[in-house]
Image: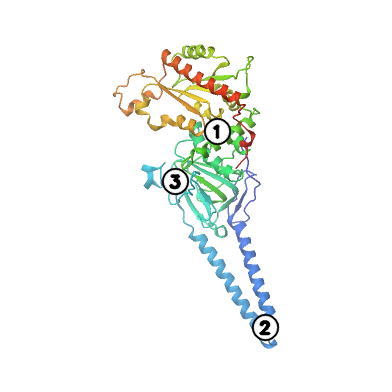
Amino acid sequence: MAKSPPELSRPTNPTLKTPSCPKQRTTMSASSLYSPKLSIFLLALCVSLFTLYHIRFLHAPPSSTSWSLMHHWERVTNCTQELESMAEKLRQAVTFLPLKDLRYADTAPEGHTWFMSSMHDTREEGEEQHQQFPSESSKGRLLCLKGKETHDGSWNSYALAWPEALPINATLLKGLTFVSYNHYNYDNIWHGLSAMVPFVSWHRRNGCESPSRWILYHWGELRFDMSPWLKILIEATFGGAPYIENFEGVNDNQPVCFEKSVVIRHNEGGMSRDRRIETYDLMRCRAKVYCNLSLEGRIAEINKQGLPVIGMTLFMRTGPRSFKNESAVIGIFEKECSKIDGCRLMVAHSNNLTFCEQVKLMSLTDILASAHGAQLTNLFLMDKNSSVMEFFPKGWLKLAGVGQYVFHWLADSSGMRHQGAWRDPNGDECPYGEDDRRCMSIYKTGKIGLNETYFTEWAKKVLNEVKLKKLEEAAANKTNASASICACG
């Protein structure tokens, strides 16, 4: 069940349309929240000035006191009117800019992105790149959006406004809001995870502060959902299911402002390797706690002979990038596993497992062998220093671009050991010539064959490495996990 934001406080201005929002959404209109605050401030100022002048004129001649009081009260009234006029001008002066700036379309995911293009990120060495509102860099201003468009992000817009002078007809959402820009999508668990990681890093560095809501943008266009796997990981990490804002009941041109917000648009960009490892440690630990699994680590598991158990998992796919002869591949790894005391081979299909079943499987895995695909995103859930073996169909090396290395990067970022990749030299022929980029549409859905000699030597090498490492760690009574990594820094 999705996490619901705090209690609703509805606008009182009869000229504003009351949003038909969920009862728990914490929202207030700008006029209902800030006009009373401003009025109280001005009234207090006037009363203070009046009192001071009154005390002063107690010592003045009686004949001049009433005239002076009237004169100074008129000045106070004029001052109040000027302040109210200034606040109104500030409301009128709020300028909304396109959320997606098409001038930067050619470099959208890099550098100065097309999402909120006039804003610059906060860059601290080794930390996630982010924007926070209000902050010193925003001069105390809040983020406001007109952002309901789901088909053309250039129709969505953003602005900054002072809390005392929000745009006319604005709705204020209380609590912390995470605003995510993802150049890819939130349905694929790898792309979704890469967008989530910097928010977890920010959460970790800010006393475990958790969001009241998430706002998801893809190319500046509003999205309403993410993969179930990612939702549960967010729930485990932040202590509650994510509430994904859809601006229900808000008119297309009605501004929505946020009491506090964090915007991230570069995924893990700017984060050092140490910071990424700490972030993945936190998510791994909290996922295990959520799924009621031990935090002791793999070294604690031994077989009847007192030897550390080595868990080798073949994580299979169905359809594109599956093995042409799955049973033959299983046979090769099964044979090599049987030669190592304590080795246990597990075979699983990612589409048949719940989130917690995947977390449990990874917690039992020292060596993960799988075809390139989103299911490999689970690799960060293994104990640190575990090994990954990856398989590709024909054609990927030449045509797939940098995306083919994402799980190599994920292994490095989460403290795992990527043991290389096997790329099938055989596969479907492309009618355009093998170097033509149009061939990638054919190779992307290709299936993977096998090379018995290569697979045998590969499995033997990695198994022996892991065996020696685990024996050394067991002798030193070393553990890979600790409940302390579940805490924020």
Q: What's the amino acid at mark 3? A: Phe
Q: Amino acid at mark 2?
A: Ser
Please give the residue where the numbered disc 2 appears in the rendered image: 66
CA–CA distance between discs 3 and 1? 23 Å
Expressed as whole percent of the image width and height from the top left, the position of residue 185 reads 47, 35
Mark 3 vs mark 1: which is more N-terminal?
Answer: 3
Q: Quadrant of residue 458?
A: top left
Rendered residue at 38%/25% (across/down): 396
Q: Vertically, is 149 above or below 90?
A: above
Count residues near mark 1 (Cα–Cα under 10 Å), then give few for <14, some for 14-19, many for 20+.
Answer: many
What is the C-alpha distance between the residues marked 2 and 3?
A: 60 Å
Q: Is residue 168 above or below residue 185?
A: below
User: Can residue 254 be seen at all in this image of the molecule?
Assistant: no
Helix, strand or loop at mark 1: helix
> Residue 418, how many percent across, how many down?
47, 27
Q: Secondary structure at mark 2?
A: helix
Q: Residue at x 64, y 34 (%)?
A: 483
Question: Between residues 264 and 411, which one lies in front from this camera angle?
Answer: 411
Q: Dot 2 surroundings within 10 Å: few (below 14), some, or many (20 or more)? A: few
- Which residue is identified by label 3? 115
Q: Which residue is mark 1?
A: 230
Tell me the CA gap for discs 1 and 2: 71 Å
